[in-house]
Amino acid sequence: MARFRARIPLARFDRRLPTLADRFDGRANSIGALRLALAFAVLVAHCWPLALDRPMLGSTETMKQADVGKLAVYGFFVLSGFLITGSALRFSLPRYLWHRALRILPGFWVCLLVTALVVAPAVAYYERGTLDGFWDHPQGPLQYLQANWLFAMDQWTISGILSDVPYGRGMKGGGPINGSLWTLRYEVLCYFMLAALMAAAVLTRARRAVVLLLLGVYLVVVEDFVRGDGLVVLPAKHGVLGPYPVVGQFDMRHVIYLTLPFLLGAVAKLFAHRVPMTGWLAALAAVGVAGTARFGAFYVVGVPLLAYLLLYLAVGLPRWLHTAGRKRDYSYGIYIYAFPVQQVFAMLIGVRYGFVTYLVASTAGTLLLAALSWHLVERPAMLLKDVVVPLPARWRSQGERSGAGAVHGLDDATEAGRVAAGQPAEGAVPATARA
């Protein structure tokens, strides 16, 4: 037996699986393409309730566990956790917060203004032939802006409009004008969670604590599953946090079940050198996601597998997809503008000319607003990344002190394209993302 072992090359025992750290290149990956696909998936999934008055695409087939919109939102949180953790590792806390604010707030604020002051009055005039009572309504546009300017989303409708569209009939006070924005407050909450970990030096000195945090959140999900009846167990109610001034209250169910994919992405970034990344594991993950979505245990098994699958796709998709979303990252704009555009087209044409016509019209309108948002709001805002008060050396991250941080972007997925195109390097997703 000893002689037989001696004939086997030692290298055969030294071979190891490639890891995420081996395969991920911040300047050549498919995260931009994935975010665009996820944003479009949300748009498509919303066509069912907004135009057809049916459950979300995939809801019935997965017994409400994993409709297409939900899968896309979870995907955004996974990719966001991965990318934003990279930003947190590169920059100081003040700079990290400044970059996060630049990436998400200007586009969001302009979306609120466009929705409240342009879209809503146009819809009201189309529906009623007059704007009488629109501006001074108890839930008018100014109240909408005041209630939601910091992601609280405590007011969904404006002056009772959209009461005759499929996703508005029977709703008190009118139909929602932008139902997609509810996830942003939980995304921002995850940003502040990372900020707290940065302030405590956890990301640099005690990374295993992030794993413990992930396990703590995951155990709550496991407990919900164990207490449920059968394999198909939906997120359980856990009460609310708040209400707090300005930001309102947070549904603990969403805090738990959206923090889980975010932390999965974050831990994957922190321990990328220990995450094996191969095609056959990704294939098993895909089967697991589909199987749990269809038959049950999606949240305890399917969500972690979905995180793995997305990270594999980020490094394993063809190279020609690496350029998608680099020079022009429309994913955030698509996410925040799709819902109001779809509501408008549900009012104007619905599916009178066929579902495909509705989908094409909604997509075209959304892309137009997303492009305007990127070129006129998001990208100009991100050019302000260096407009910060100079920090003492002890407050700056190692990357900033060495100058390394300057070559990175608001996220790794889009920076290379900007540099290659001769555009200024960005320093601050989805979102979506992320979302």
Image (spheres, rainbow, N blue to C red):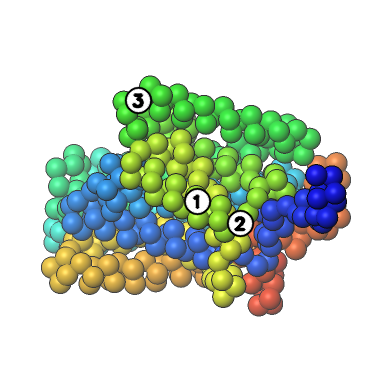
Q: Quadrant of residue 324?
A: bottom right
Residue located beneath label 3 in the image: 228
Q: CA distance from mark 1 to mark 2?
A: 10 Å
Residue 265, percent from left and from top: 59, 46
Determine whether label 1 and label 2 are within 8 Å by CB.
Answer: no
**Relative depth, front residue between 58 and 396:** 58
First in sequence: mark 3 or mark 2?
A: 3
Which amino acid lies under the numbered mark 3 shown in the image of this protein?
Gly
Which amino acid lies under the numbered mark 1 shown in the image of this protein?
Leu
Indicate the secondary structure of the residue bearing disc 2: loop
Which amino acid lies under the numbered mark 2 shown in the image of this protein?
Thr
Q: Which mark is residue 284?
A: 1
Neighbour class for label 1 at 10 Å: few (<14), some, many (≥20)?
few
First in sequence: mark 1 or mark 2?
A: 2
> Can the viewer see residue 184?
no
Q: Residue at x 50, y 55 (%)?
A: 283
In front: label 3 or label 2: 2
Q: Residue at x 31, y 56 (%)?
A: 45
Residue located beneath label 2 in the image: 278
